[in-house]
Amino acid sequence: QKDVYPSRKYSLPTYINRKDPVIYSTDLKAPLEEALLDQYEKKGFLFLDHLFEDHEIADMQKHMQCLRDSEVIKQREESITEVSSGDIRSVFDVHKLGGFFQKIAQDPRLVQIAEYLLGDRVYLHQTRLNYKPGFRGKEFYWHSDFETWHVEDGMPRMRALSMSITLTSNDHQNGPLLLIPGSHHTYVSCVGETPENNYFSSLKKQNVGVPDDASLQSLIEQHGIEAAVGQPGRITLFDCNVLHGSNGNITPAPRSNLFFVYNALSNRVGLPFGNTTPRPEYIAARKSIKAL
Amino acid sequence: QKDVYPSRKYSLPTYINRKDPVIYSTDLKAPLEEALLDQYEKKGFLFLDHLFEDHEIADMQKHMQCLRDSEVIKQREESITEVSSGDIRSVFDVHKLGGFFQKIAQDPRLVQIAEYLLGDRVYLHQTRLNYKPGFRGKEFYWHSDFETWHVEDGMPRMRALSMSITLTSNDHQNGPLLLIPGSHHTYVSCVGETPENNYFSSLKKQNVGVPDDASLQSLIEQHGIEAAVGQPGRITLFDCNVLHGSNGNITPAPRSNLFFVYNALSNRVGLPFGNTTPRPEYIAARKSIKAL
């Protein structure tokens, strides 16, 4: 398969123009208002409030707490814990735990939007529950998810999106998700080689597949930065190639979210374009692909 | 000398009520409006815009850049450089470089305010120029300056204040100074022992003399957090015991400021209350005390 988005291959960073649509469907019966679609096309992300009822959000928060406190969950290979405290940071494959989170990931209100934007039936490429602690929450550096999914997972084209449902209040001070509007139109081909088993460390701190300083400076000068602040239940829906990151968090307020990645069925992953060993199934669905 | 603000001495954190005034002068001829004085009394800090003219700020920015580029400055013991890049992070004792920065530190507009609030003649306890880089700017954890000045420098009472003149734009995203309004009324006696030569590392990352999680949580729940955002030239004036810190900064926008600590002449430092070797003169004036 031809690599139309090469990265980690050249000694200098290069820009590649996006070769794929942002919104794949063209029919008029969209599940989102036109203003929101315009915003998504232009910025590469949008915010949805009130898609879930208050009692649904409260349920998510309750189930999040249960998972967090569960010793069984902590022992799963798919749970990332902090070395020093042993606390859970991420629980991958939450949709495979059955019941509650599976139902949310398959919720028609979310799936219909994903199907419309991607113009195809969709499946879950990755799901997880994230806990970011207060006081000593670490930053996450700027990156495009697609860059990693392409190089390390073999996702061919930009035809995937993420939905992050926040379960906590996010303000400017507790390290909210920061996005560069419009950055999804450009693919920054990054410098650096991928070490084997890169995901062991990259899930905690990404060192390769991050854009160079000059590219970031230029994109941010051009487009600015927008922060995903808001109340529990707010959904941040973002294109697979929008650059995002977050600062650390010294405030006591933690940040938690439910994170679902929807990929078009026609865009399922092949061999990694970086020629590395494919990452585990819980990070990138390869065998367990099932249209929702 | 009796230690009225013991810290790093007990195995559990304790609160000690402030035993000193916040504003020492009581006469009516204040150099600040009453609303600002009220704010300072209640919150422990205030912001001053337009105290300097635009051309004065532009001059400060120019001189900052010169210092930053100077090899001579880089070689000074009083300059803190970054291990990896060799770039200057802080230049201490800028008022001793003669000329430009000395004049600003002694500017009557600043000194009169310091004298009024501290009810005494004042001297410079510490001065510095700070450069916080973009992209990989590190966080600075919550602390009270007074706690360190008391334990490590021997400053007897809460009768000092800081003025930070920002030389860059600060927004919510580039890791602005965060302050806990009202926290200056409480002294958090911290847990932990001071290592010898603690300042070598504490100027980069403070590990002792930081409040415990429960104290921070409680103070922030009670008082909230305020961010010192604003344009170049804005002065943040804050009491020596107000808790403050800052998140890291992954944005390209650096943060720089001029930082002056004024102490009351009657409050000059003695032997450190933590029984450690006094820190160097450029971090805490001991011999070179001169009323302004």
Image: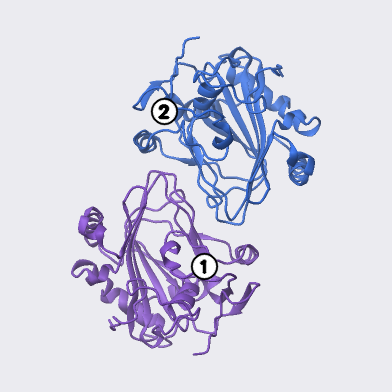
Chain colours: A blue, B purple
Residue count near mark 2 (Cα–Cα under 10 Å), binned few <14, some 14–19, many ≥20: many
User: Between A95 and A283, which is closer to the camera in this rendering?
Assistant: A283
Percent across and percent down for residue A202 are: 54, 35
Residue B255's tag is none
B74 lies above or below A67: below
- Can residue B54 be seen here? no
Measure how far apart labels 2 and 1 are at the Cα level. Answer: 40 Å
- B117 horizontally vs A67: left or right: left
Q: In screen coordinates, is A56 left or right of B280? A: right
The chain that hosts pointer 1 is B
Disc 2 chain ID: A
Do circles 2 and 1 both sit on a common chain?
Answer: no
Q: Amino acid at mark 1?
A: Leu
Whole-percent x, y for residue A166 in the image:
64, 41
Q: Splitting the image into 4 quarters, where does residue B239 fall?
A: bottom left
Outermost residue toward the front? B196
User: Residue furthest toward the bottom?
Assistant: B1
Q: Nearer the viewer, mark 2 or mark 1?
A: 2
Give the labeled residue for mark 1: B243
| Residue in the image at 33% along x and 75% along y | B281
Is the residue B124 above or below the residue A244 in the image? below
Q: Give whichever of A17, B135 is nearer the camera.
A: B135
Q: Secondary structure at mark 1?
A: loop
Q: x and y percent of residue A14 in the render?
A: 36, 25
Label 2: which residue?
A190
Residue A240 position within the rendered picture, expressed as x and y whole percent measured from the top left: 53, 26
User: Could you tell me the amino acid type at mark 2?
Assistant: Cys
